[in-house]
Amino acid sequence: MNKNLWLLALCQGLFLTNNVVFIAINGLVGLQLAPYGWMATLPVMGYVVGGALSTGLVARTQRRWGRQASFQIGLAVAVVSALLCAGAAFAHQFWLLCAATVVAGYYSANGQLYRFAAAELAPPAFREKAVSLVLAGGLLGAVAGPNLANHTRNLLAAPFAGAYVALVLVGLLSMLLMAFVRFPAVAQAADGAASQGRPLGALLREPAFFVATLGAALGYGVMNLLMAATPLAMQVCGYDFADAAFVLEWHVIGMFAPGFFTGHLIKRFGVLAVMGVGVLLNAACVAVALAGVEIAHFTVALTLLGVGWNFLFTGSTTLAMQAYRPEEKDRAQAAINFCVFATMALTSFASGALVTTQGWALLNWGSLLPIGLTGAGLAWLAWRRRTGCSARIGR
């Protein structure tokens, strides 16, 4: 871990602080301002839709100006969008809140690339550990995010407006830290199609890249489906916001604490084995959630969900980096992040609609479908590798 990786890990932690606060409060603010209850999580959905729409633009910005400039632009957008969210809370404008979260998605699209940038700041033999340890910086968000939301929610006259203002300070601190990170210079591509690498269609026909994308998208989708619905479900069950903040804190600890050893596990047991354990942990989360609605059930279920996400997401990132060439990184990373954001957008809307109309239990039963699909994809890739089948999909 060199100085640049430590700074990037801190930026990752502040990025997750922003994300956790958004997840913790956007649905509740949406519930207060929305014309209908089923629209409560539209601001959460707006955040990931904005991220999906921004992936192509972020990829072009990264390719033209490099990591440093693109990340700083994303942080500036984070500051502006937090101010817009605070204004929406004061003005009681639901659609302004949704628009502000869509704008904030540009920051999210940038922040999702921190893990790939980590691999570029470390020697090749240390890539898995660098990705894992920078993701572990999210522990800062695990502690700071829920507590920041809880202690600033009534700071100003409008509920939760103080939390949005606090995120302005988080964004400014991130900009200061990012200014000291030294990234490798932008490589200038030579002329010719070969220098641009394979087109996206060819990349997606690579089994390893396809399964990496599937694992990242569905792993994030299941996590977001259950996490976004948790504050609403707990409110329906009569729990205070402080209880929901406590559960989310343990969830995010589960997401990022394993980062200190996930890279070692991947080196020792292989990436597919670690991702397979992530699938099993997601299934265990559903089993605990269906067993009851006490605070202990929510806490244990969400913690298992967090650890499962970490194994799947770190593993998917590592698997993807094994499947694309250096000249293809912007295209490949943008494709993965677009699929992640598109899945998150769908699950953000579905979580609010299902938990307010069908209930917490049905939401958990429904999450077994993407969990099963992820497990099937991993089993398929493991079978191909065991049988020595290296041809692309469709050949």
Image: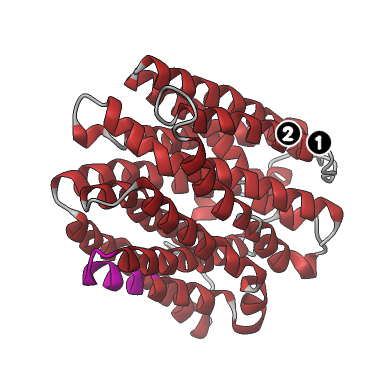
How far apart are the two marked residues, 2 and 1, measured between alpha carbons?
Answer: 6 Å
Which residue has dot 1 on it? 179
Residue at 46% over, 77% down = 277
User: Pointer 2 and pointer 1: residues touching (CB < 8 Å)?
Assistant: yes
Return the mark for residue 234: none
Residue 253 left/right relative to 134: left
Check residue 220 for magenta coloring.
no
Q: Where residue 309 appears, x then y in whole percent? A: 47, 63
Give the camera-side residue of 308 and 240.
240
Residue at 85% over, 44% down = 182
Give the camera-side residue of 120 and 93.
93
Hey, what amino acid is under mark 2? Met
Q: Is mark 2 on a helix, strand or loop?
A: helix
Q: Quadrant of the C terminus?
A: bottom left
Q: Where residue 16 appears, x then y in whole percent? A: 57, 47
Residue at 46% over, 62% down = 215
Which residue has dot 2 on it? 175
Q: Quadrant of the N terminus?
A: bottom right
Task: Specify the principal SS of the magenta part.
Answer: helix
Hey, what amino acid is under mark 1? Ala
> Badge 2: how crowded within 10 Å, few (<14), some, or many (20+)?
some
Q: What element carries label 1?
A: loop
Q: Can residue 237 be seen in this view?
A: yes
Per the rendered image, the range of residues in magenta is 282-294
Residue 130 left/right relative to 21: right
Q: Where residue 20 appears, x then y in whole percent? A: 49, 46
Up/down of 38 relative to 245, above or below: above
Q: Is residue 392 visible?
A: no
